[in-house]
């Protein structure tokens, strides 16, 4: 059963068509990395799927059109960890993470013991327990990124959309955060669609990669097939070597040797 189905999907931003005629079917429990150069349309695609931006064509989450679901129903199914999170002023880390429980709150917005336990659980798992009472607008970029992931996981979604989830993280936190998402995938069949610039890291976690170029899906397959040096040169204008490694291909930037 597919969790996500896009057929002939289009996304416009302002006057520009930024995603064109995109076909993508994602099965339950898969991890699909969305890669491509700056401006390729990765964020626009994720925002279209999360019903934050209008789309054209066919889009289904299971059998539902996300654009027709109520915000509450949609938030119980899909969580987006945004690339540029909005942090309300005056909110603590715990309160910001607790926003992930909003779709589960009872009438009058009261938190249950289950909601509080879910928040504490994610704070602890992401190493944020000691930051819980700090103002959320006074965190480092990497701390905030982990807070936003904790909030998304609190939603207990079926589909997790990650937009550059590790861009501000040091190498240790990159691995621990992606390991944690992968654990959720195996424990409860979470499906992951993640826009990532680090191709080597993306290849280690995703079992499938889709490559966007100027809004068009140009490659779709296992990382070893998509990460081809010639293709990457064509799409990114990058000089790279691609080395086969047991955990997935490693993409190494190559600087021409100067004389
Ligand atoms: N609100 C907007 N109004 C008009 N154009 C926009 C808007 N947001 C994005 N765009 C344009 O849409 C195109 C796709 O942008 P998008 O953010 O989806 O790309 P991306 O692949 O996520 O890029 P990056 O890797 O730089 O984050 C870009 O040309 C961008 O300038």
Image (cartoon, rainbow, N blue to C red):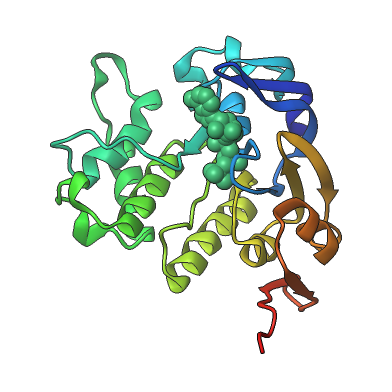
Q: Residue furthest front?
A: 259
Drawn side of residue 183 relative to residue 248, left or right: left
| Above or below: residue 239 compared with residue 20 | below
Residue shown at 54%/17% (left/top)? 14
Residue shown at 74%/22% (left/top)? 9
Drawn side of residue 25 relative to residue 253, left or right: right
Percent position (x, y) of residue 194? 60, 47
The image quadrant of residue 232 is bottom right
Q: Residue furthest bottom?
A: 259
Percent position (x, y) of residue 229? 81, 66
| Above or below: residue 62 compared with residue 150 | above
Residue 1 visible in the picture: no
The image quadrant of residue 139 is bottom left
Drawn side of residue 172 relative to residue 243, left or right: left
| Above or below: residue 84 compared with residue 129 | above
Percent position (x, y) of residue 185? 62, 51
Residue shown at 37%/39% (left/top)? 85
Residue 177 visible in the picture: yes
């Amino acid at each position: 059963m597919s969790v996500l189905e896009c057929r002939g999907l289009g996304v416009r931003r302002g006057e520009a068509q930024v995603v064109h005629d995109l076909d993508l079917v994602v099965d339950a429990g898969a991890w699909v990395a969305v890669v491509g150069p700056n401006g390729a349309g990765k964020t626009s695609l994720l925002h279209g799927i999360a019903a934050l931006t209008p789309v054209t064509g066919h889009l289904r989450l299971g059998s539902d059109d996300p654009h027709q679901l109520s915000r509450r129903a949609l938030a119980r199914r899909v969580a987006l960890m945004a690339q540029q999170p909005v942090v309300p002023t005056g909110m603590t880390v715990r309160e910001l993470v607790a926003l992930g429980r909003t779709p589960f709150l009872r009438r009058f917005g009261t938190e249950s013991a289950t909601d509080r336990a879910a928040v504490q659980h994610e704070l602890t798992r992401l190493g944020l327990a000691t930051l819980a009472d700090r103002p959320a607008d006074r965190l480092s970029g990497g701390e905030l990124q982990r807070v936003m992931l904790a909030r998304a996981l609190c939603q207990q979604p079926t589909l997790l959309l990650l937009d550059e989830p590790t861009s501000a993280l040091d190498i240790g936190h990159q691995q621990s955060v992606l390991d944690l998402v992968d654990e959720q995938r195996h424990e409860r069949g979470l499906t992951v669609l993640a826009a990532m610039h680090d191709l080597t890291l993306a290849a280690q976690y995703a079992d499938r990669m889709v490559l966007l170029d100027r809004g068009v899906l140009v490659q779709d397959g296992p990382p070893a097939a998509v990460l081809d040096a010639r293709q990457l040169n064509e799409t990114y204008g990058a000089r790279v070597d691609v080395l086969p490694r047991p955990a997935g291909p490693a993409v190494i930037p190559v600087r021409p040797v100067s004389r």
